[in-house]
Amino acid sequence: MQNILAFLWEGTTMKRNDALKILNPILAVFFVNQAVTALLGARISYEAFEVFHKGGGRVLIALIIVHFILNFNWVKANYLHK
């Protein structure tokens, strides 16, 4: 897995911390979107619910995967040590 992550970062100009500074606020917005649309699901149209809650959920999952990949060294150091 480490070789795959190293390959992904070769030749890139953006550092992991810079990417996380962009990614984390976007994650927060999509998290709040999920909470708000869940609470207001009965008050908004089904079409709006489809776009904002279901579509936002798919984007949120993708962002969480990217967040996990960017933080894999931390996860490995704290949870996967030998």
Image (cartoon, rainbow, N blue to C red):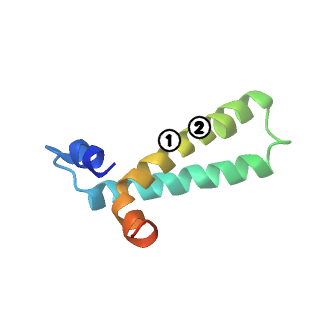
Give the residue type that dot 1 points to. Ala
11 on left or right of 77: left
Q: Residue at x 39, y 64 (%)?
A: 76
Instruction: Give the crowd class for mark 1: few <14, some 14-19, many >=20 residues within 10 Å.
Output: few
Q: Residue at x 29, y 61 (%)?
A: 17
Q: Give the residue displayed 46% in from the left and 68% down from the top.
A: 79
The image position of residue 46, as x and y in percent, is: 79, 30
- Tell me where residue 48 appears, x and y as whole percent: 71, 32
- In this orientation, which residue lies closer to the viewer: 76 or 13? 76
Q: Residue furthest front?
A: 82
Quadrant in the picture for residue 8: top left
Task: Measure how far apart labels 1 and 2 are at the Cα level.
Answer: 6 Å
The residue furthest left is 11
Name the residue furthest right.
42
- Figure check: 28 above or below 47: below
* Picture disc at residue 62: 1
Q: Secondary structure at mark 2?
A: helix
The total of numbered circles placed on residues is 2
How far from the left and from the top, in percent, is residue 54? 67, 36
Q: Are marks 1 and 2 in contact (CB under 8 Å)?
A: yes
Identify whether 45 is placed above or below 32. Answer: above
**Amino acid of disc 2:** Arg
Percent position (x, y) of residue 62? 50, 41
Label 1 element class: helix
In this figure, which residue is indicated by the disc labeled 2?
58
Q: Nearer the viewer, residue 17 or 44?
A: 17
Quarter holding the C terminus? bottom left
